[in-house]
């Protein structure tokens, strides 16, 4: 009974990770369409959720990579899997709180590798798989996405030089609906499978399926539904950073960025690379700014995101390792329940902190301003009418993750409405 309970906790935690992955990565597909107003915010996340659900059934190559290409399945135990999942979830929630588009994929891989290192040492990690399937794609994906989106945006800008902006915007907004839909479909083919792979690892470790088993259908279905539900909630903080913080994007840039993201993600899914869709989407948005004559790219915002990317694997790995040490120190079922309880308490604390300055579909498109010394006043934009400027004092906000994510000032300037600095048209 204890083994069955432990397996159930691991499966629930894996689905919880899939849920956080959904709302953390919604912006990868829909941030630019929301920013250019090609789609209304709620319509965008609904469409993305449906297509993520469909995409999850289209391929299992990435699930196989996660289950059998990163860590040695022979040394995996259920407590190790649980500790790794907690590492991934905690990092997802921390970066979501600060509106940072970090990689859910790398958070998961980092958590699992950290837990395995704490359990059995370096022999339990398949380093060749980590390098070839995770690290190399992580380095190449954003560079390729910047290049593809930059060239695509430049080409589109050349083609539409003589077209009135109103006509151009109308046409490309329709195109954005198609390209954003393709990104959501591609996201489902890649990211939903990561939790499928983790659950398969847990089933193998718990003796529920043989070591050479493929992913059961109920696992595919449950992961697809969990990600779709998370996507529907909308990760508004991350959507705001991607849509408003990097580039003031127009519909031409939006379509070029989304099409580039979809192409790179689908190609990686075909080859089974555990690619970060966040890295691809961010690279595409940056490329759309590089390729558009006269566009301004906020490289300081991008730089802070890159720093967060660099520390994602070790930070999630550290949490995973600490969780496994805690499990071992307490021992048995009590240790497992303690780690699971710690996850619930931490998640609740982060959610409560996010309510201080909420971001939702009403204010996700408020103007981004990096001017120092003022704080955006959180005002729900329900009518779309432009009101007077309002400026408030900058509060002192302590943060335990300051050493990782930067100073309070840096974090506040990166964070979404209510935390971004400057003036806003309320």
Image (cartoon, rainbow, N blue to C red):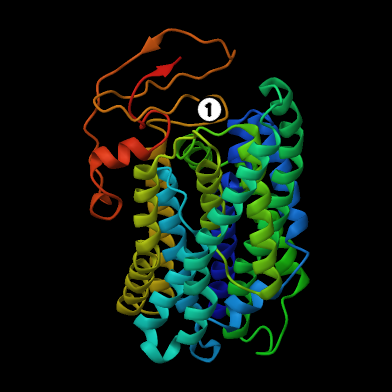
Instruction: Please identify the quarter of the rendering in which residue 374 is found.
Output: top left
Q: Nearer the viewer, residue 397 or 171?
A: 171
Q: Is residue 14 above or below residue 122?
A: above
Instruction: Please identify the quarter of the rendering in which residue 98 is found.
Output: top left
- Is residue 126 in view from this perspective? no
Q: Nearer the viewer, residue 39 or 117?
A: 39
Image spot of residue 10 (x, y percent): 54, 70
How crowded is the residue under tag 1: few (<14 C-alpha within 10 Å), some, or many (20+)?
A: many
Rendered residue at 44%/54% (across/down):
344
Image spot of residue 54 (x, y percent): 78, 56
Mark 1, secondary structure of its residue: loop
Rendered residue at 48%/71% (across/down):
109
Count how many numbered circles sit on residues in the image: 1
Left of 211 or right of it: where is 119? left
Left of 46 or right of it: where is 73? left
Q: Is residue 294 above or below residue 330?
A: above
User: Residue farthest to the top?
Assistant: 388
From the image, which quarter does the N terminus lie in? bottom right
Left of 254 or right of it: where is 306? left
Rendered residue at 25%/45% (across/down):
399
Image spot of residue 179 (x, y percent): 72, 45
Image spot of residue 99 (x, y percent): 43, 43
Q: Is residue 188 above or below residue 369?
A: below
Rendered residue at 31%/42% (across/down):
411
Q: Is residue 222 above or below residue 176?
A: below
Q: Which residue in the protein does label 1 denote?
A: 365
- Is residue 272 in view from this perspective? yes
């Amino acid at each position: 009974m204890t083994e069955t309970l432990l397996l159930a906790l691991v499966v629930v935690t894996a689905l919880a990770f899939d849920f956080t992955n959904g709302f953390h990565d919604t912006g990868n597909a829909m941030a630019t369409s929301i920013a250019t107003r090609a789609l209304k915010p709620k319509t965008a996340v609904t469409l993305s959720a449906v297509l993520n659900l469909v995409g999850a059934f289209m391929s299992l190559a990435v699930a196989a990579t996660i289950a059998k290409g990163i860590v040695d399945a022979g040394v995996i135990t259920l407590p190790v899997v649980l500790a790794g999942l907690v590492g991934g979830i905690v990092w997802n929630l921390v970066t979501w709180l600060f509106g940072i588009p970090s990689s859910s994929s790398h958070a998961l891989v980092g958590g699992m590798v950290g837990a395995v290192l704490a359990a059995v040492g370096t022999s339990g990690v398949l380093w060749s798989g980590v390098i070839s399937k995770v690290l190399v794609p992580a380095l190449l994906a954003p560079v390729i996405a910047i290049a593809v989106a930059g060239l695509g945006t430049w080409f589109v800008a050349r083609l539409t030089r003589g077209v009135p902006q109103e006509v151009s915007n109308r046409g490309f907004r329709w195109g954005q609906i198609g390209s954003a839909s393709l990104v959501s479909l591609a996201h489902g083919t890649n990211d939903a499978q990561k939790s499928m792979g983790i659950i398969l690892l847990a089933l193998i470790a718990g003796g529920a399926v043989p070591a050479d088993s493929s992913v059961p259908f109920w696992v595919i279905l449950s992961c697809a539904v969990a990600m779709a539900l998370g996507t529907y909630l909308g990760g508004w903080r991350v959507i705001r950073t991607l849509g408003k913080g990097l580039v003031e994007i127009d519909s031409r840039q939006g379509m070029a960025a989304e099409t580039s993201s979809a192409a790179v993600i689908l190609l990686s899914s075909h080859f089974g690379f555990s690619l970060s869709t966040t890295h691809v989407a961010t690279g595409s948005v940056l490329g759309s700014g590089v390729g558009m004559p006269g566009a301004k790219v906020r490289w300081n915002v991008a730089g802070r995101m890159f720093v967060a990317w660099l520390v994602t694997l070790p930070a999630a790995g550290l949490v995973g390792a600490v969780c496994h040490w805690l499990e071992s120190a307490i021992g048995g079922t009590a240790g497992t329940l303690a780690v699971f309880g710690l996850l619930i308490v931490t998640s609740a604390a982060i959610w409560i902190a996010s309510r201080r300055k909420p971001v939702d579909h009403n204010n996700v498109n408020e103007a981004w301003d990096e001017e120092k010394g003022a704080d955006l006043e959180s005002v729900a934009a329900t009518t779309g009418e432009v009101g007077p400027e309002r400026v408030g004092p900058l509060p002192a906000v302590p943060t335990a993750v300051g050493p990782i994510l930067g100073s309070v000032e840096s974090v506040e300037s990166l964070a979404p409405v209510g935390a971004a600095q400057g003036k806003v048209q309320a």
